[in-house]
Image (cartoon, helix red, strand yellow):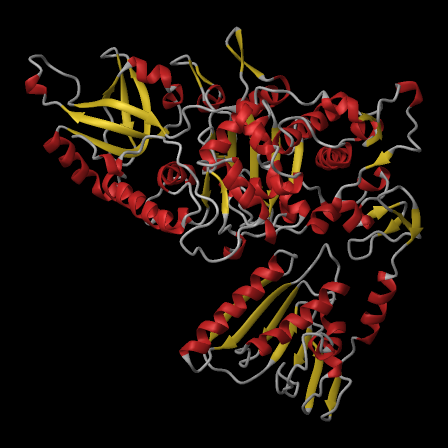
Amino acid sequence: MSIPPKETVERVDSQASFPVEDGKKGVLAGYEETAARAFDGFVVRKDLVGQVKGNAIVPSYVLEFLLAQYCATTSESAIIEGVESVRRILARHYVNCGDSELIKSRIYEAGQYRIIDKVSVTLDDIHDRYSATFENLGITNALVSDETVRENDRLLTGGVWCMADVSYVSTGDTGAKATSPWIVSRLQAIQLPRFDFDRYCRGRASFSADQWIDLLVASVGLDPAKLSRRAKLFQLTRLVPYVERNYNLVELGPKGTGKSHIYSEFSPHGILVSGGEVTLAKLFVNNATRRIGLVGYWDVVAFDEFAGRKRVERSLVDTLKNYLANKSFSRGDSTITAEASMVFVGNTTRTVPAMLATADLFEALPEAYHDTAYMDRIHYYLPGWEVDIVRPELFSRGYGLIVDYLAEALRHLRTLDYSGDLDTLATLDPAMSKRDQDAVRKTFSGLAKLIFPARDGAPEELEELLRFAIEGRKRVKDQIIRLDDTMAASGSHFTYMLGRVDQDHYDAARACMVPTQEELDYPQYFTSHSDADERGSGQRGGEELSDGLPKSDGVVNASGDSRPASPVFDRRALLKARAIPRRYKIEPSMGHSMPGILLPYLFDAAEIQIRDPYLRKPHQIRNVHEILLLLIQHADAARLPRVVIETCASDEDDYRAKQEATFEQLQQSWGQFGIVIDWSIVDDFHDRSIVTDTGWVIDLGRGLDVYESFTWSSPFDPRITLPHLRRTKEITINVSRDTEGHA
């Protein structure tokens, strides 16, 4: 069957129309205007992917490949027409699993039909040929030529999204017994056929560094205007495995930060596999077939859901550790080298201070990988807890580079090495270990390739990347030192001096020190190493720990200077002294804060149960939020409470939907800061109370909604933030304590 010209899906260089035509609403950002001129034909509006995807379960790079043919323009009318064309192509040629028999019928009736599907190939050694399997179409034995497989060798492992012309030839028409009636007459992998690196560098020269970073972030699919500078660099660090060979990255953090997206849908050169499903044969080599595994075919192999309790083959762990260190693995008596970068992404279940106080930042890893030998092979630990939770408003609605074009640029950069540029910029601490230096150099090289492909970065711009690279490796080393006394003996040496400095003249006192963000945020957990091995036993220098925090006359900050200890224990002691059974009866007046009244009874609880039938409207639910605001300032950061809320449904359906949405926002907002909120809407009840696992029972009388309504005079009205400036209604609160079973 021939494909009508209007439905061709061959790559063409579309001409981006600029300036904006046909009344497109809004103004393009500076980087978008520059991109439209510098990369005409290779920019696309990122929100179009969502418009055309529908129920097609395909990676973003596949959809952008199609959109590039028709929508690589800033003309609104051309975009609308192009989107419709792509929708028609998907409707006609993308194979949904449920429509597989219909598509087979079309191939049978027409003799040939073009489809879009994920294709993998195996060698049929019985019939001496290659067989193609179409994931959604359900065909497992299609004939494919040797030449096609040689040109697309990644078909042999994992599968590749392709556009394929599939023919049906009746076995009775061949005059001989055929092995399959299905024949792949033409196959094209979804990726750019040609890439001009010189043009890419010329295009980059049109941007400032800030504009280029914004374009890269937008190309990934996020709105750079919604992200901080540090957040943008984290997103770019996720791309470093694509531009650096044999780069090892770990990202652990809370759910919903987009950890796996960049490896599953961003590039045709990376593959995302389940951390629990990987085998030695699949990853490295199958001894039975003598076929190399994923590391031989993909630029990036990412392990999804890598954290948690998993059963892992010991031989896989040993082989993986050897590969991470030496870029090679053994098969029998031979050694095989490969260039695939490794990425390990997983979810943490506890907050950073909780991990630092009782364990380490690698605690979420499977037990088989929770050892210093594995950790020491990691080049960069990306702190997922610092990455923004992906929300709809974070997605880009503007223009960015077409994904397959950027993917080819990254693959070309993979062949280059910019680590030597570090030598002209700065000198690393000579006491830094070889592995630490190699890790810093590889990360610096990767970030420099991404932001300055023409190697034209200014010294101050490159120094920012150097500091960022050092921080990620130092995060790894800090955790190793917590676990391994022998590593602690060598110390943590993560300093540098600008310019070329002879080793004999390196002055550590004048060198620039790079702390991790955790050191700055939680200095109380970064005491000397001699304390680290005593955290688990609850002792430090013969003194007891109080609430998981060390008692000390001083702490060491990120620059190594001593300073007086925080008066946190005095505040907590005062709060504990104020927590006594009593009856509060307050007349309508100002000067009373419900969070302040409740804090002494809540600050040291591990679980708080709130029952109030009137947590329905946003301002009522905000009363809970205000309690948590004060609570998090006084509770142990390593032991934040779980909050269980029960309330009743709003009487009106519209308010019910708003009530549920507000609770979900409350839950999501506090979850990323370590306070877990479980809320439920139950049958009507009247009593209003707060109960803690420490035994306090607080009868709230009229509940949490104790303030008279007021109208904000402006966004700066102090009553919005300070409850004691509001006028309360009449309040009666009874506090008692159930001492049975509680300390």
Front in this rendered view, residue 658 or 165: 165
Image quarter in which the C terminus is found: bottom right
Extreme residue toward the top, this view: 333
Q: Residue at x 17, y 17 (%)?
A: 179
Whether residue 310 appears in this view of the structure is: no
Q: In the drawing, does residue 193 fall left or right of residue 200?
A: left
Asked whether the viewer can see residue 218, the reply is yes
Total residue callouts: 0
Residue 249 horizontal side relative to residue 391, left or right: right
* Identity of the residue drawn at 47% across and 33% down: 267
Quadrant hosting residue 443: top right
Residue 685, position in %: x, y? 50, 82
x then y, percent, for residue 560:
89, 41
55 is higher (above) or lower (below) than 249:
below
Figure check: 356 above or below 621: above
Left or right: where 614 falls relative to 633 = left
The residue closer to the viewer here, 389 or 165, is 165
Of residues 697 and 34, which is closer to you in this image? 34
The quarter of the displayed image where residue 656 is located: bottom left
Q: In the displayed structure, does residue 384 sit left or right of residue 340?
A: right
Q: Position of residue 369 (x, y in %)?
A: 61, 32
Q: Residue at x 56, y 20 (%)?
A: 319
Residue 736 at x, y percent in the picture: 71, 80
Please tell me whether residue 166 is drawn above or below residue 517 in the rendered image.
Answer: above
Point out the image quarter for the N terminus: top left
Judge by depth and name the residue closer to the eye, 470 or 465: 465
- The answer to whether residue 170 is above or below residue 557 is above
